[in-house]
Amino acid sequence: MKLSLHGVSVWYSNAVTQLRIAQETGFSSLEILPEHLYRYLDNGGSYAAFRQLMAQHHIDVTCINALKRIGRHQPEARAELLREAEQICQAAVELRCPLVQIMALTELDQLPAAERDAILLDNISAIADIGKAHGIKFQIEVVAFTAFNSLQQALDLIARSGKDNLGVVVDFWHLHAGGGTTPDEVAQMDKNLIYGVHFCDGRAAHPDEAWDEWVQRNYAPGEGDVDIAAWVAAVKATGYDGVWSPELLSPRHWEHDLWDISRSCLDSMRKYIN
């Protein structure tokens, strides 16, 4: 098992500081956001310098999270998507990172299911081919507040694609709040298709409440409606022993000391996993 600090959990920090926080609070790795990485590069940083800092802090990067809106399909938008895929894969190569997260948002929700799935299949296949050339794998995250929100939908597309560098991330909040997946389904998975775990809590949107992750995910583990113990047990039942990353998407907690946030994330995850 590998414990990786999630960049979302320390949202108001920069990429360099996240390496130090991860090391000093007991993590062995970092799941980095491209927003933080690209901001570092745009303001005088370099991949070589960042690799030196990774070595200095004994922290590796397990995932770049994320390439978003993978359902873009109009010609110019799709071309932009594939350029972004190439860019993020190049970043992964530079950071010696084996994995990139990909996710659709609401860009396809107005389409019939068959058309939506055809577009996603076409796009994830093209993205997988770009990554294959660089030795990069992709974890699909299904998003609770979209039409593409169940584990089975992702697994079906992976099977149809025939690509061997596609898997899923088991994100407790998204799977719980999306309502289309149970822990039992996760427990029956092939562990080789689980590329990562996002350990998190929260709740679904209430009736007539707009979806807003900064509201519905504003909970520390144990405060929300997610049956964390059940999801942890389901993942462990598969025999999965890869990366676990605590994702604390919580404006309330983001205002705490960054080191305290990271320590509490690690402590709560160990409490449930061990």
Image: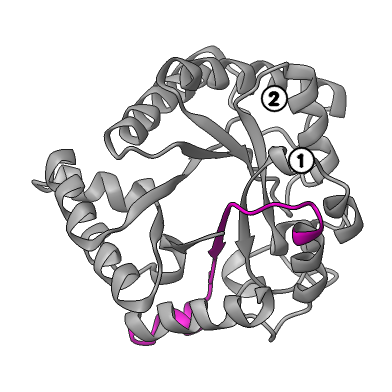
Q: Residue 92 location in percent, x, y? A: 36, 35
**Residue furthest left as drawn:** 44
Q: CA distance from mark 2 to mark 1?
A: 10 Å
Q: Residue 176 location in percent, x, y? A: 80, 63
Residue range (magenta): 236-257
State left or right for residue 87 relative to residue 81: left
- Residue 129 magenta-drawn? no
- Is tag 2's residue or tag 1's residue first in the polypeptide sequence? 2
Query: How packed is label 1: few (under 14 Cα within 10 Å), some, or many (20 or more)?
Result: many
Quarter that holds the N terminus:
bottom right
The residue positioned 34% from the left and 80% from the top of the image is 258
Q: Vertical placement of 79 versus 37: above or below?
A: above
Q: Residue 160 location in percent, x, y? A: 79, 19
User: Considering depth in this image, is 145 or 237 the residue closer to the camera?
Assistant: 237
The residue positioned 86% from the left and 29% from the top of the image is 113
The residue positioned 53% from the left and 83% from the top of the image is 267
* Amino acid at dot 1: Phe
Q: Which mark is residue 120?
A: 2
Residue position marked by numbered label 1 in the rendering: 148
Secondary structure under tag 2 reads helix
Asked whether the viewer can see residue 186, the reply is: yes
Q: Vertical placement of 90 versus 57: above or below?
A: above
Quarter that holds the C terminus:
bottom right
Query: How packed is label 2: few (under 14 Cα within 10 Å), some, or many (20 or more)?
Result: many
User: Considering depth in this image, is 110 or 231 the residue closer to the camera?
Assistant: 231
Mark 2 and 1 residues: CB-CB less than 8 Å, in contact?
yes
- Residue 241 magenta-drawn? yes
Asked whether the viewer can see residue 116, the reply is: no
State left or right for residue 79 relative to residue 233: left
What number of labels is visible? 2
